Image (cartoon, helix red, strand yellow):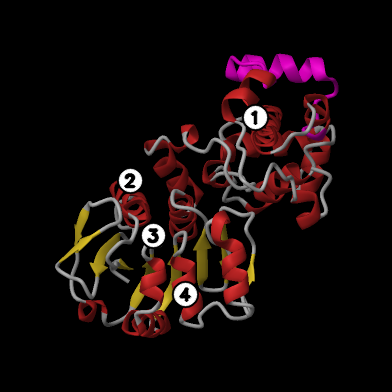
């Protein structure tokens, strides 16, 4: 394979960021690829070619739908305010269904998942969409299991992302799947994504996911750490999960992750605390316990040293309040106490 062909199907009234966000991720990844690695080639196709006006008034150039024939690596379907009208376009829906059959994987951003569902591609699968429209999607497509919580859902060859900017998180995950965690993290850093994800749906941002090591034993330990942040997490226990001696584990962990196990745990505890401050109304003392800080005072010192804010100040700035209120459903989803 000389290149990974990414075909974006565009329609009038689609949201510009749904289109350009993932494309920018693939473009930056191309610029950071090692010599000899397989690059992405992006193509925009539309029945409204050659110039398609998005919902914000920005126009994008596209080729006719016929140009999208042939094998496709990734078919990408954006959402937008006009998705209801697009659903009534049987030519578009049929084209998406046919194109999906010759694609290695199919991805959607925001309301683009409605178009995949309308084409019957998501029947019997899990999918997500913008939180404001998840109930509508569940009612309209009862054969689809709609999960409004994650930033994106990957089920077989289908990847659906939540609202608007989460298409960027999804694209980073695709880059990681294609080229490994190191390139995905470097792409995220270049796009300054560690400053972007304040609040949102309850999954960790792509930046933290991209920090999972390629080395399977270390990755296993990291995943276990994420599931057990409420516990003390001594290095010996982490090493046992990786089936390594503590000394060798510490050495390999630093080599693979770029930091010591203790520093990684501390950073991850702070990241989880930020998420809970942003998306729940839990008392700060309870958050400290759930994130593994032995006492609230320890939490306050660590949080302030890392972010220059108290937990209360951080919550005041970044807490996300939606029409449905603040709900922490993770314990219902995965059985963990966090």
Quadrant of the frame with the N terminus: bottom left
Q: Residue at x 53, y 46 (%)?
A: 206
Q: Nearer the viewer, mark 3 or mark 2?
A: 3
Residue nearer the viewer, 40 or 200? 200
Residue at mark 3 to residue at mark 2: CA–CA distance:
34 Å
Q: Where residue 100 appears, x then y in whole percent? A: 41, 79
Q: Where residue 282 appears, x then y in whole percent? A: 78, 33
- Lower position in the chain sequence, tag 4 or tag 1: 4
Q: Where residue 28 appears, x then y in whole percent? A: 32, 47
Q: Which residue is mark 3?
A: 81
| 142 versus 193 height, above or below | below
Element type where label 4 sits in the image:
helix
Asked if the residues shown at circle 4 and circle 1 are in contact, with their CB atoms under 8 angstroms apart, the answer is no
- Lower position in the chain sequence, tag 4 or tag 3: 3
Residue at mark 4 to residue at mark 3: CA–CA distance:
16 Å
- Lower position in the chain sequence, tag 3 or tag 2: 2
Q: Which residue is mark 2?
A: 32
| 5 versus 338 height, above or below | below
Residue nearer the viewer, 303 or 135? 135
Q: Residue at x 63, y 14 (%)?
A: 305
- Lower position in the chain sequence, tag 1 or tag 3: 3
Horizontal side, residue 166 vs residue 52: left or right: right
Residue 204 shows which numbered tag?
none
Residue at mark 4 to residue at mark 2: CA–CA distance:
31 Å
Residue at mark 1 to residue at mark 3: CA–CA distance:
38 Å
* Image quarter of residue 260: top right
Residue 208 visible, this angle: yes
Instruction: Point out the stretch of residues depicted in magenta.
Output: 290-311
Q: Which residue is mark 4?
A: 116
Residue 267 shows which numbered tag?
1
């Amino acid at each position: 394979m000389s290149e990974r062909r990414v075909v974006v199907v565009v329609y009038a009234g689609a949201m510009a960021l749904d289109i350009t966000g993932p494309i920018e991720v693939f473009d930056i990844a191309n610029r950071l690829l090692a010599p000899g690695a397989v690059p992405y080639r992006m193509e925009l196709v539309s029945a409204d070619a050659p110039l398609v006006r998005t919902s914000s008034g920005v126009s994008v150039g596209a080729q006719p739908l016929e140009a999208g024939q042939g094998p496709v690596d990734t078919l990408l379907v954006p959402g937008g305010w006009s998705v209801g009208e697009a659903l009534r376009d049987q030519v578009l829906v049929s084209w998406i269904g046919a194109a999906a059959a010759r694609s290695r994987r199919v991805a959607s951003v925001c309301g683009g998942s409605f178009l995949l569902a309308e084409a019957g591609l998501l029947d019997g699968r899990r999918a997500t969409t913008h939180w404001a429209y998840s109930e509508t999607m569940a009612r309209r497509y009862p054969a689809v299991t709609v999960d409004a919580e994650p930033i994106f859902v990957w089920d077989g060859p289908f990847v659906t992302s939540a609202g608007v900017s989460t298409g960027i998180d999804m694209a980073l995950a695709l880059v990681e799947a294609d080229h490994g965690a190191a390139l995905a993290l470097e792409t995220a850093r270049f796009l300054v994504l560690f400053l972007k994800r304040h609040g949102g749906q309850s999954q960790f941002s792509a930046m933290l996911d991209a920090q999972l090591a390629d080395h399977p034993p270390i990755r296993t330990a990291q995943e276990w750490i994420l599931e057990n942040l409420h516990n003390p997490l001594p290095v010996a226990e982490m090493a046992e999960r990786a089936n390594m001696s503590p000394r060798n584990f510490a050495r390999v962990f630093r080599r693979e992750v770029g930091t010591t196990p203790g520093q990684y745990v501390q950073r991850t505890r702070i990241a989880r605390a930020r998420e809970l401050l942003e998306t729940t109304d839990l008392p700060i003392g309870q958050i400290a316990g759930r994130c593994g800080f032995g006492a609230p005072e320890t939490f306050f010192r660590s949080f302030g040293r890392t972010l220059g804010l108290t937990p209360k100040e951080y919550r005041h700035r970044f807490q996300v309040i939606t029409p449905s209120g603040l709900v922490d459903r993770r314990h219902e989803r995965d059985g963990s106490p966090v």
